[in-house]
């Protein structure tokens, strides 16, 4: 049984357009660029959840389903999967709307990112539970 998409549950944490500088000579967007957009989206999302500063400590289960092309509108959707004492895990789905194609949205990538909440000295700190 497939898990329902988080895309239908909330607005994106990040939306951008894939540009020529983000592509290889064949016109496919680099996976590293997509991963960096997901990390930015996840950090924005997680910082609101924990109300604090975070650093990325792990990326699990990175899966590329479809390529991303120059001109695609890229959107990252996030949901909390776990909150520990000092860390938070966020599942991120990346969807695209193809340039000049249709209104169809396609899931291209997904992964789980783990962030650790840190203090001003960059040491792990307890996440306050509300």
Image: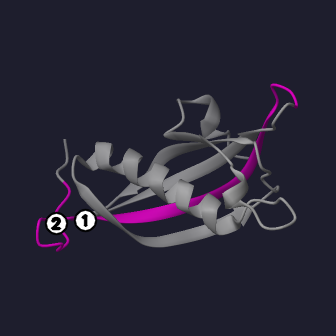
**Tag 2 near tag 1, CB within 8 Å:** yes
Side of 24 where 15 appears, left or right: left
Q: Position of residue 44 (x, y in %)?
A: 38, 47
Q: Which residue is mark 2?
A: 125
Residue 12, quarter of picture = top right
Kindly report the distance in space between the C-alpha atoms of the residues bearing marks 2 and 1: 6 Å
Q: Is residue 19 magenta?
A: no
Circle 1: element type: loop
Residue 7, quarter of picture = top right
Residue occupying image coordinates x 78% and y 67%? 24
Q: Position of residue 115 (x, y in %)?
A: 37, 64
Q: Nearer the viewer, residue 90 or 71?
A: 71
Side of 93 where 125 appears, left or right: left
Q: Which residue is mark 1?
A: 86
Q: Position of residue 68 (x, y in %)?
A: 77, 53
Circle 2: element type: loop
- Colouring chosen for the image of the structure: one colour
Residue 120, quarter of picture = bottom left
| Of the image marks 2 and 1, the number of the one nearer the N terminus | 1
């Amino acid at each position: 049984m497939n898990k329902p998409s988080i895309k239908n549950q909330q607005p994106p944490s990040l939306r951008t357009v894939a540009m020529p500088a983000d592509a290889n000579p064949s016109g496919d967007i680099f996976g590293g660029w997509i991963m960096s957009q997901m990390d930015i989206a996840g950090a924005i999302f997680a910082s609101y959840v924990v109300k604090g500063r975070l650093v990325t400590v792990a990326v699990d289960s990175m899966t590329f389903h479809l390529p991303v092309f120059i001109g695609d509108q890229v959107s990252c959707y996030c949901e909390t999967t776990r909150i520990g004492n000092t860390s938070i895990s966020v599942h991120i789905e990346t969807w695209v709307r193809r340039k000049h194609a249709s209104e169809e949205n396609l899931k291209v990538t997904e992964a789980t990112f783990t962030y650790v909440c840190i203090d001003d000295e960059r040491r792990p700190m307890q996440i306050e539970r509300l």
